[in-house]
Amino acid sequence: MPRFDGGRFPLATDLRSGRHVHACGASIPSSACSSATPTTGPMTQKPSLSGIPPRKLESILAPLPRYRAVQVFSWINSGVDSFEAMNNLPLALRRELDGHFCLRKTTLIKKLEDGNGAAKLQIGIPGGMVEAVILVDGAGRRTACLSTQLGCAMGCVFCRTGLMGLTRNLDSAEITEQFYHIRKFYPDIANIVFMGMGEPLLNLSELRRSLEVLCRTMSPRRITVSTCGLVDGIESLAGEGPAVRLAVSITSAREELRRRLMPVSDANPLRRLKEALLRHQWRHGRRITLEAVLLGGINGSTEDAYAMAAFAEGLDVVVNLIPWNPVDGLCFEGVPLKEPSIAELGHFCSELEKQGLKTVIRREKGRNVCGACGQLGSVVNKDFTL
Ligand code: SAH
Ligand code: SF4
């Protein structure tokens, strides 16, 4: 992907002399400069400075002094979308930065409101569009739900994003900018969850970069990464952090059924998944969320509750029970999926509780805009090549 990464600020103005200074240190008059800035694709000719962790930003902006990079980072992370607004930087420097970089490589296309507090933003990225969601709980606290991939390769049978297949990973700028777009409308975001489009642990390096940035504005305790259960990725978070919360889409703890619903289980069996979760919990000490999408007539029996309890033994978990959100055309082994009945939901919940599992039913807001779990899809511009 053509993007500016790893280099240094190619031409920084030496503010004392009014000359440009190359990264190599050579000094040349401004008039002699032609932009050597790499391009990022058709949406912008300049690389974005968003989504870049502070230390990396320092090296990109060198030879500017470190405190300037710190100032630029804190402006970016406060959500400003123009260099002009960075009013503690000298005007000449703001212009210089503006000549080489941009602060957004994504654009807000549309905001759709659910009518009950939830909303969905459609965000244009080079080559397509991703969706980010704003959820609101009973106490009025808002959560930003971010996407990490355009589509998803994991093919869970109940999920609309899975139906799309994977187009590409999002980079750290495209991930963090979703948060900035959301915060423009909702400055009071209390939590971030990576539960939008895609599988975060299949995009681990860009996820980590975006977490390094976002953890500067939000405590890692208020950030949750949701995975379909990729053992290597969980081990990596356990070993190297960051110590964000983890949610695992278990769906069913009956191995054979889980394999039919979630192809990821073939290479990531429940025994190995549990070992990785134990290590993560031992290392970071955070309660883990087990997400169980309840599919009408499929995974809500007493036997399913026993299996879930056996899986959870020894772990500190809460089970999030999510009644399946309808997606047209999705079938399980030839039979159209359906929502669970109220009775089925109540039965499964009480069976889980009888087994001693703390269980929360997550009734989704956002359905009116197809913004609830598993309903996110996207438009992909097939003509665009990265
Ligand atoms: N790929 C990650 C995160 C994105 S999916 C993961 O699988 O965890 C976020 C959540 O949406 C997962 O818990 C998934 O099980 C759930 N989900 C997917 N499709 C759904 C649907 N149609 N209704 C309700 N929840 C769904
Ligand atoms: Fe991908 Fe998660 Fe959907 Fe499965 S549930 S297809 S992992 S986005």
Image (tube, grey):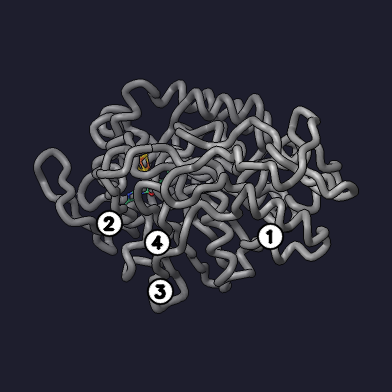
Report the mark closest to the observer, 1 or 2.
Answer: 1
Report the mark closest to the observer, 3 or 4.
Answer: 4
Residue at mark 3: 113
The alpha-carbon separation of the residues under discs 1 and 3 comes to 30 Å
**Which label belongs to residue 344?**
2
Give, as a three-letter code, the residue at label 3: Glu
Which tag, 1 or 2, sits closer to the chain's start? 1
| Residue count near mark 3 (Cα–Cα under 10 Å), binned few <14, some 14–19, many ≥20 | some
Say which residue appears at 34% left-offset and 54% top-offset.
Answer: 376
Query: Could you tell me which quadrant the N terminus lies in?
Result: top left
Say which residue appears at 38% left-offset and 67% top-offset.
Answer: 366
Give, as a three-letter code, the residue at label 1: Phe
Say which residue appears at 31% left-offset and 50% top-offset.
Answer: 294
Q: Residue 353, can we see it?
A: no
The alpha-carbon separation of the residues under discs 2 and 3 comes to 30 Å
- Residue 17, image x and y in percent? 88, 47
Which tag, 2 or 4, sits closer to the chain's start? 4
Residue at mark 1: 83
- Residue 245, image x and y in percent? 60, 43
Give, as a three-letter code, the residue at label 2: Glu
| Residue count near mark 4 (Cα–Cα under 10 Å), binned few <14, some 14–19, many ≥20 | many
Residue 215's place in the image compared with 188, above or below, is above
Quarter of the figure with residue 89: bottom right
| Residue placed most toward the observer, 135 or 180 | 180
- Residue 272, image x and y in percent? 46, 21
